[in-house]
């Protein structure tokens, strides 16, 4: 069994190649149960959480021909890690197994795998739903996902300018600085409303529990990509957003049960389930409707799906195996 760390994961993946891999994975399909949430109550500590996300392939078809494989992601979320221990609040591993024998094949760094596949799913949805001429992107949030969302969206649309908004502007500036030599114009904005009003693509990646983007701000033709707010009691958009937009989710089971941006307006009667027009399975298989006009406002809401982790993990595994033994940096270790 091999251990593959975050640097090795990143070295094995790229955009738009991973977007294509996810497109293929959703077209073929896999068994992808709703993830398991386990709250961990610790004395005198904020409540922690453990997530378990299993998936397995039922077919050798398509890009994932070396399988089939079984995978499971285990993520821990300790909200006070940053302040208490100066460590990331989200940590975890991904275990890839052979479905021929059940043999463990590799343990991978799960946070790295997650940011790569999450941004790829957003870019996949954008490739189907945003305007082909979308060039101006606004990103709300400057966390671990920020640079990946910019790269992924720019790999499928002709993005020339990105504005980043964050409650802590210094963090947005750090993300912008990473693109200084890229040729992509990435700047920081302190006025989210003004930025959204001129954007072609608005991507939100925050842990906000209350709306930060208003539907009244969205111009005709905007594509809204909502990545944060991963629980049913969290949301980044208001009722006007979902009322004005045509709606899609990454998976119906996740979107209708876990995505606060969808669950809350559903419970309030603002929208109905019929207004959620499709998911990534339907888009990749050509069975879900697309935008019908350049003026349509489209909204994609994701909470993450284990099929995405499995597809990305297999892509990493295939690259690592073809590269042979551990490289000089020791990023890959035999166990």
Image (cartoon, rainbow, N blue to C red):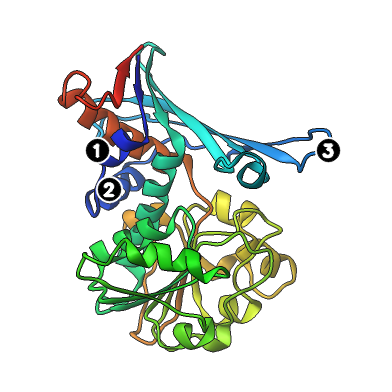
Q: Secondary structure at mark 3?
A: loop
Mark 2 or mark 1: which is in front? 1
Q: Which residue is found at the position 36% from the left and 11% from the top? A: 335
Q: Quadrant of the N terminus?
A: top left
Q: Residue at x 41, y 88 (%)?
A: 198
Residue at 55% x, 59% y is 228
User: Residue 99, position in %: x, y?
Assistant: 38, 19
Label drawn at residue 18: 2
Q: Residues within 10 Å of mark 1 (few under 14, many from 20)?
A: some
Q: Residues within 10 Å of mark 3 (few under 14, many from 20)?
A: few
Q: Residue 220 falls in which quadrant of the image?
A: bottom left
Mark 2 closeness class: few <14, some 14–19, many ≥20 residues within 10 Å: many
Relative to 152, does residue 10 appear above or below in the rendering? above
Res. 272 image quadrant: bottom right
Look at mark 3 in the image and give the residue it sits on.
44
- Check disc 1 and report the residue beneath it: 12
Q: Which of the marked residues, 2 or 1, is nearer the chain's N terminus?
A: 1
Q: Is residue 225 visible?
A: no
Residue 256 in the image, given as x and y percentages of width and height: 61, 56
| Separation of marks 2 and 3 at Cα, in angstroms | 42 Å
Tell whether 222 sits left or right of 79: left
């Amino acid at each position: 069994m091999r251990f593959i760390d975050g640097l090795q994961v990143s070295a094995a993946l790229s955009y738009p190649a991973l977007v294509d891999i996810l497109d293929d994975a959703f077209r073929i399909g896999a068994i992808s149960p709703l993830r398991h949430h386990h709250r961990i109550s610790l004395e005198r500590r904020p409540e922690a959480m453990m997530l378990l996300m299993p998936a397995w392939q039922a077919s050798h078809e398509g890009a994932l021909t070396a399988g089939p494989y079984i995978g499971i992601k285990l993520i821990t979320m300790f909200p006070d890690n940053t302040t208490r221990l100066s460590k990331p609040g989200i940590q975890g591993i991904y275990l890839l197994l052979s479905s021929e024998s059940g043999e463990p094949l590799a343990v991978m760094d799960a946070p790295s795998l997650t940011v790569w596949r999450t941004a790829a799913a957003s870019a996949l949805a954008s490739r189907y739903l945003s305007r082909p001429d979308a060039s101006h992107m606004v990103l709300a949030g400057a966390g671990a996902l920020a640079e990946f969302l910019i790269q992924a969206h720019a790999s499928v649309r002709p993005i020339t300018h990105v504005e980043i908004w964050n409650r802590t502007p210094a963090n947005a500036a750090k993300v912008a600085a990473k693109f200084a030599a890229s040729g992509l114009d990435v700047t920081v904005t302190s006025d989210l409303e003004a930025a959204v009003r001129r954007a072609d693509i608005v991507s939100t990646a925050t842990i906000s529990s209350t709306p930060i983007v208003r539907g009244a701000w969205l111009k005709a033709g905007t594509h809204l990509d909502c990545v944060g707010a991963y629980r049913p009691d969290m949301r980044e958009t208001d009722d006007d957003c979902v009322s004005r937009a045509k709606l899609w989710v990454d998976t119906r089971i996740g979107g209708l049960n876990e995505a606060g941006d969808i669950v809350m307006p559903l419970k309030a009667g603002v929208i109905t389930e019929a207004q959620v027009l499709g998911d990534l399975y339907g888009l990749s298989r050509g069975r879900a409707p697309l935008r019908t006009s350049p003026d349509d406002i489209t909204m994609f809401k994701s909470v993450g799906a284990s099929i995405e982790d499995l597809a990305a993990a297999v892509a990493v595994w295939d690259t690592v195996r073809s590269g042979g033994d551990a490289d000089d940096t020791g990023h890959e270790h035999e166990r």
